[in-house]
Image (cartoon, rainbow, N blue to C red):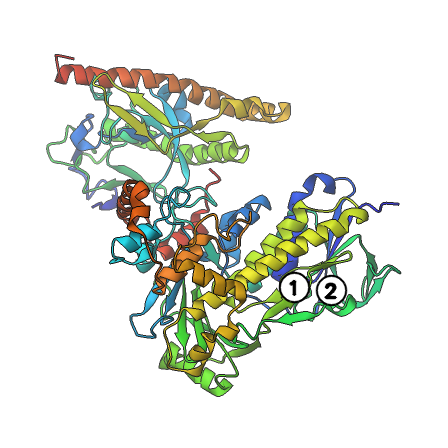
Amino acid sequence: MTNIVVLNSHTHLKLRVHARPSASWGDDQRFVAVVVGELPAVAMHYPIFFSKEADTGRFYCGAMLGIDPRENLFLEEHRERRLYRPLNLQRGPFYSSGPDLAIDMEHPRVANSGDQALFEGSGEPSVYLKSIIGLMNDLKPGLERTRQFIDTLLELKLIEPLSVNLTFDDGSRREIDGLYTVSPGAVGALSDTQVVDLFRRGYLQLIYLQTASLAHLTELTRRKNLGFLRADPEL
Amino acid sequence: MTQRIRSVVIVGGGTAGWLTAGIIAARHQGRMKSDFSVTLVESPTVPIIGVGEGTWPTLRSSLQKMGVLEADLFRHCNAAFKQGAQFARWTSGAEDDAYYHPLMLPQGFTQVNLVPHWLANGASRTFCDTVTPQGHLCDEGLAPKMITTPEYHAVANYSYHLDAGKFAGFLQRHCTEKLQVRHVLADVEEVLQTEQGDIKSVRTRQAGEIGGDLFVDCTGFSSLLLGKSLGVPFNSCGDVLFCDAALALQVPYDREDAPLPSHTISTAQDAGWIWDIGLPHRRGTGYVYSTRHTSDEQAHETLMRYLGPAHRHLTARKIAIRGGHRSTFWKKNCVAVGLAAGFLEPLESSAIVLIELSAKLIAEQMPANREIMDIVARRFNDVTHYRWGRIIDFLKLHYVLTKRVDTAFWRDNVDPATVPDRLQDLLRLWKYRSPWFFDEFDRLEEVFPAASYQYVLYGMGFRTEVDADDNVDTQAMAARLVRDNIALATQMRAQLPKNRELVNKICEYGMQPI
């Protein structure tokens, strides 16, 4: 259940939220939607894929944080602020409602025991809330820019399905469906005009960031194996 | 002197004309940049007869090859998914008498024939439910795919129900805008022939004389080129298939979100059968009947009784059905497609699939020059004759298996004198061996595969003698396939959305190309 309401300093003056990363507060996501603006930061640590929204079938771009459902293998680093945490996790219970900032009152992060206040006693936004407003200012136009980027990739037929098959030290296997990547072969077959156009729009860099980021799958596998090792010292 | 074939002239718009234009133009895009052209001459006044609203899955690949976006078909032709047909009251006439002819093949169809195994195990569940999940999907009004499934891809095999009137206009826009088909709006006043009897040109009132190397007759029932000019006679099949009239009626839904069935419902009546096809915005219904066995008034009453009192104020449109086909389809440099070639009652939605198959054959076998055209024509006629014969057999199969004796229509239908010889032979054969591969089904593009015969035969209670020893070799595989089918049904029912929900989403969000 969600209950999304527009935020205001009168009604929500005393409202507090948990800002810290935690699996029980919604960080337990193995695949998080990201926007093009954060791709350089995301591509440093996580494999980036395209996938389809279950409800609309439309493509979106996401960072893979885990192997199994509800698994985030980077929680510790997120807590210690050692690795970049995607905007969609940072935003917590906040949404945009037209020009306004809104909040989901049913979100588990919204609690009296929360570590962050939203407003000062005077009704001024807290430093934390200001950071959320700034984040939303990146995220909102970012969604539109990401959509344009993906539409261009689809138009040029640059996206292809990628079946991810992983084998782990405990002998188990995972086959992850529904993931797509830019096809380096299709990029190589583009005409000079198309390549220059992609370059001028900043898309060529994004394409290389995405394809290079797939190498991080090895890191995900390593972390997953580490988990098996802890669970079973015999291994 | 060999005259090269460079200019194809299609006379007549409508579904047949535009689908043929699209299929030929798409296949010859490369040559169309240089010296090959496709022209469609269409009367600005003659109304289009919208044949059938049911199609076969072949339409998916035809449209894909033409470069049509599948979502556009849903948006512009009021299309919906079709996963098969349900035949009600055809066997006993009882209220609960119904079976499905789904579009999915039985599990493992190319590996093993499940019919003898199903029979040997007592046939306690229906044949359809034993070998495919699709009957369940139809029962529950589920769509054959998800919004995340790429366009033209299926989770469960499907075709479309669509608004045939809108379909022709939709294809026209696509053909003229994307496939360089020349569109001439003009009335043909005269067909001019050479001394050898070829068609040289058509003289039109508005656009003068239009010449061509190959003419495609898509002029509907009038068969202006092949029938009238080249004198090819029409062979009626009224002695086999009795229905010769239809009363068609479009019925609104009670509410906008009424459930949308993803199968055609065909309900047997006293002197024919009623079709019921769900489009997103309305139902298309109609009573196909034999005027030898009922009157127009009685037929009207039957249709009204089927629809219920709420729809009494609606006016039905009477359509004459002239079952049969031309005695040849390609003569000289003229080939007929669509109603100009022939027509059969729409019991198995054979009209549009026949257009596609003919157009595809013409496109693939496009004669390089006039000299070899007669060879191509002979082969085209062989295949097309075979196809019409097979479809007539298959339609008759639905009637000949009935156990109904309540009206003269049903009693007359089982009279051996009305059953084609080939079908009689097959029925004798099938008593001892169920249809599968290696019997008659050897053609590359069989309109109705052996699977279709299986669904109808065993849906209508036909029984084939089974030798249990003959099953031993394939028993383990058959048991596994039947178990797989149960698992697949569970999985699909959990995964697939409601038919209407998906159609709405496709119109709103479109479909992904991959």
Q: Position of residue B373 (x, y in %)?
A: 76, 50
- Label 2 resides on the chain identified as B
Identify which residue is drawn at 59% across, 54% down: B356
Between A67 and B349, the residue placed more toward the observer is B349
Q: Establish whether labels 2 and 1 are both on one chain.
A: yes
Between B207 and B389, the residue placed more toward the observer is B389
Label 2 – label 1 distance at C-alpha = 8 Å
> Could you tell whether B492 is left or right of B337 in the image?
left
Q: Position of residue B244 (x, y in %)?
A: 55, 77
Residue found farthest to the top: A234
At label 2, the amino acid type is: Leu
Q: Which residue is mark 2?
A: B226
**Quadrant housing the N terminus of chain B:** top right
Q: In which quarter of the view is residue B344 placed? A: bottom right
Q: Is residue B339 visible?
A: yes
Identify which residue is drawn at 47% across, 44% down: B151
Q: Which residue is mark 1?
A: B341
